[in-house]
Image (cartoon, rainbow, N blue to C red):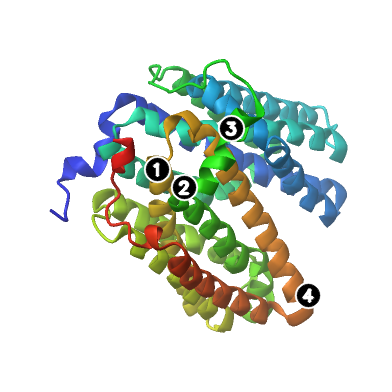
Amino acid sequence: MSVLQGADRFAAFRHVSYARFFLARFLASFAIQIISVSVGWQMYAQTQNTLYLGLIGLFQFLPSLLLILVTGSVADRYSRRMIVSICMILGALCAAALLGLTIADAFSPWPVFAILIVFGIERAFMAPAVQSLAPNLVPAHDLANAIAWNSSSWQTAAILGPVAGGLLYGVSAILAYCTALVFLIFASILVFMIEKPAQHSLGTARNWSSILAGFRFIRTEKVVLGAISLDLFAVLLGGAVALMPVFASEILVLGPLGLGLLRAAPGFGAILVAVTLAAYPIRHHAGRLMFAGVALFGIATVVFGVSHVASLSIAALMLMGAADMISVYVRETLIALWTPDAVRGRVNAVNMVFVGASNELGEFRAGTMAHFFGAVPAVVIGGVGTLAVAVIWALGFPQLRKIDSLSVPERQS
């Protein structure tokens, strides 16, 4: 049956633990967006230095890279539920510290960067744990539904969070940080209320072989290697977010409000597809649809790059978000299903670093190419590159391309 009954659209929510996890993750993601927007605005207002804006992202990303060998092992060795709850509490303490600096009128770059490093460490430990926790909360036959709702939750927070952060900051920076603080506290309580799920632990053995098991598994498991590397190179080449201010101000002449519409458009497209996939999950040809999504993302990127009409540009961005969501849905489901629970944390730690690296390096690639060749060629070349990646990976990973259904592989059933 291709169309699910109404109840099946919310299959994952029939599990109370997942419902609590879903709400907690949404609140935490929302709070992170509020903090990111508020810190950026406040930093620029205080310093008028764009370099500091770049350092904000760098200080939050570096802990994930530097701690990659630790964070995944911790997620596999200890209770993921407790790790996520503790990390959210630590995030709340960071929000409280930013609130304290603001109240004391002591907001300045280096104390803030110190807080953001702690915030980055918290997120480095939470990312693999939170990614690995969801598969422990639902049976395998509901996992695809859960991932679709997870994706829609994150996309919704990514769209509404910056808007809410801007509005709250417009009223008061204190109000913005207070809201983020409350959300993170409530999220940590919800995670703590989740019943202890089954989890295959590493035990007590600690050696390099155990620590590097995530890398070894990714290298030998072609489906997971293909899925993770596809995302790395597709986003690295196809990212156009960094150049949106150029398109809004110089090419489409839309102004600040138009820039907001451009930034929101991919998220709206992604949410529409995520909700649709939760109701009508992919039953067959999953591998081919994933590669088709990446190819469509590349084509839509090219259309956005050459467009000089605002409506067409926004439509292209929505299509980019929609196509990307198809790829993300299949890719994340495959990674979750094909990765044994005992190494899931370490694999997700590598995956999260790759995702972060592709975003950061993708913006650097776009900005550098735009500097030498112009914004339009930079976006168009990136789109063509993404399309090429889809073709090369489809040919290079035939097992990934030939996957039909999103079900548990026989070797793990």
Residue 247 placement (x, y as % from top left): 64, 75
Cα–Cα gap, marks 2 and 3:
18 Å
Q: Closer to the camera, 292 or 32?
A: 292
The crowd level at tag 2 (other Cα within 10 Å; few <14, some 14-19, many 20+) is: few
Cα–Cα gap, marks 4 and 1:
41 Å
Residue 163 placement (x, y as % from top left): 56, 50
Image depth: mark 4 or mark 3 in front: 3
Image depth: mark 2 or mark 3 in front: 2
Q: Earlier in the sequence, mark 3 or mark 1?
A: 3
Cα–Cα gap, marks 4 and 3:
37 Å
**Element at badge 3?**
helix
- The answer to whether the residue labelled 1 contacts the one labelled 2, judged by CB atoms less than 8 Å apart, is yes
**Element at badge 4?**
helix
**Element at badge 1?**
helix
Q: Which residue is under mark 3?
A: 72
Image depth: mark 2 or mark 4 in front: 2
Q: Given the image, on which type of amino acid does mark 1 rest?
A: Trp
Q: Which residue is under mark 2?
A: 221
**Element at badge 2?**
loop
Q: Given the image, on which type of amino acid does mark 4 rest?
A: His
Where residue 164 sits, quadrant-wise, is top right
Does residue 237 appear left or right of residue 321 in this picture?
right
Image depth: mark 1 or mark 2 in front: 2
Q: Given the image, on which type of amino acid does mark 2 rest?
A: Glu
The crowd level at tag 3 (other Cα within 10 Å; few <14, some 14-19, many 20+) is: many
- Is residue 72 at least partly visible in the picture? yes
Q: Which residue is under mark 4?
A: 371
Q: Which residue is under mark 1?
A: 338
Q: Earlier in the sequence, mark 1 or mark 2?
A: 2
- The answer to whether the residue labelled 2 contacts the one labelled 3, judged by CB atoms less than 8 Å apart, is no
